[in-house]
Amino acid sequence: MNLANLLIRSAQRRPNSAAIKVGTTIFADYRDLASRTCRIAASMVQQFGLQRGDRVAIAMKNTPTYLEVLYGAWIAGLAAVPMNAKLHRNEFRYMLEHSGAKLCFATKDLASDLSTLSSELPNLREVIDVDSADYSRLLENEPLDCVPVEANEMAWLFYTSGTTGRPKGAILTHQNLLAMTLCYFADVDAATSEDHWLQAAPMSHGSGLYNIPIVAAGGCQVIPESGQFDPEEIFKLLPQTPNLCFFAAPTMVKRLEQAAANWDVDSRNLKTVVYGGGPMYVADLKAAMARFGPAFVQIYGQGESPMTITALGRGDHLDTDNPRYEKRLASVGQAQSAVEVRIADEEGNPLPKDEVGEVLVRGPSVMPGYWQNPEASLMTLRDGWLHTGDVGALDDEGYLTLMDRSKDVIISGGSNIYPREVEEVLLRHPAVLECSVVGMPHAEWGEEVVAFVVARPDAAVNETGLDALCLAEIARFKRPKKYRFVEGLPKNNYGKVLKTELRKMIE
């Protein structure tokens, strides 16, 4: 089934309901949105000659037009290639060339620079400024009917964040994204037509992927007037926006909680905060729940199985009397409804409960492979399972606790040390704002533990206090042998700490 039918159906059921708002102002109801997307689809086919399966790139900050282009591509039977608006021109160039995109839609801040690529890339026919009169003229065509597609046809070419080497393009089919959507309803949140989904994180990734279940439910997408994540803007929107939901990386949740200290925040309209995309430390999660109430749900997924591996539901966050409460908060929850999850050794053999190994997943949400990269596809998809590269353990109730990426595990004296375990302890120190742990080469032990620590403003922290905390909480061999006190941690555009950069700082 073509995913665009979800929009068409909501337009039939709720034509006059708000589909998109900018802040608190209605940009389009469902009738308008469906009409505009069908007209954009017609332009892609009739004016630019695109054919079923062609790729359409999106280089846009968060804006209402984003959804028009995304669903317009699907209505025409095309595949979307969303790209983070904060990327460098060379990164845009690589993705446009690698994907073979024939059209690129861009916001004004990017269109001028990217338009020069049309002459450099033979497949790229035009870069269209969505804030221009040229784009407005595309809306004058007669609407195109939704093109039927097969479930296994590509809908979204999802480029990984590329923290090491070139990003790979995960092929996400209509079936993959439909499975993700159904898992949202089953395992994440009971989305309704009254929900307002705030697009505060980049729509090119997790936040944008979750537009689909909201559209399916007939809810409203809210684009911040700033087009980005701004805690104060969210606090101002909350009292005026019922059933507010949004996706946030753990670093965003932490920023919200810290910013709320200076606000009289009315969080009664806050329905759901879906967090994921990196480790959420228990101390940070507890502080956020104390500040904002019972709104939190965690998901664990990858671009290769979008937003759909495990989920830690709202009930798990509230079940404080459970003897395993702390352990569950430190986990990423249980397998989502459409997938199977197992822990395996290096040969892919399943491991018993509570043993640490690589996280494997299979199910209808898992990509069929990487675009134009058969070697990486064979390496990642083996024996019917997606090998995530993440290290974790399953307990006897099916809760998955992630340790780290396999490449981040520190091996010292023949023993595995999982950086997250050490980081969780360091964050219990009242003066520590952020920290990240990496391995440093050591002639005798192979590697030794180095902790990069960011202190809270006006707080004092030293090696002696941190050492004492670690010795009281974890085995001696796991404690950091060196501490680096820094003003901030290097992060990518999605808020993930770049441990590769920390290792370079050591070198």
Image (spheres, grey):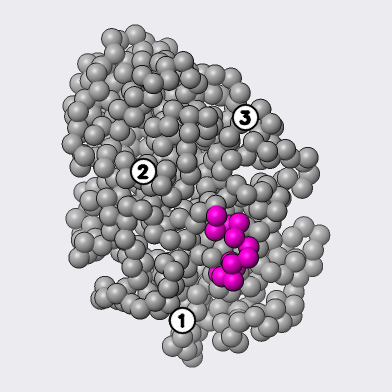
Task: Give the residue drawn at x 34%, y 8%.
Answer: 140
Q: CA distance from mark 2 to mark 3?
A: 25 Å
Residues in magenta, as a range = 315-327
Helix, strand or loop under label 3? loop
Circle 1 or circle 3, nearest the eye: 3
Helix, strand or loop under label 2? helix
Task: Give the residue drawn at x 51%, y 65%.
Answer: 331
Q: Residue furthest right?
A: 458
Q: Which is nearer the eye, 142 or 459?
A: 142
Let me know if residue 326 is in the magenta part.
yes
Give amino acid for label 3: Thr
Label 2 vs 3, first from the N-terminus: 2
- Looking at the rendered structure, which numbered label has been put on residue 182? 2
Where is residue 92 shown, x and y percent of the image? 38, 40
How many other residues sit within 10 Å of disc 2, few (<14), some (14-19) or many (≥20)?
some
Please tell me whether residue 338 is drawn above or below residue 14 in the rendered image: below
Q: CA distance from mark 1 to mark 2?
A: 37 Å
Q: Which residue is mark 1?
A: 416
Tag 2–tag 3 contact (CB < 8 Å): no
- For the N terminus, the quadrant is top left
Where is residue 269 shown, x and y percent of the image? 64, 36
Where is residue 148 shown, x and y percent of the image? 19, 28
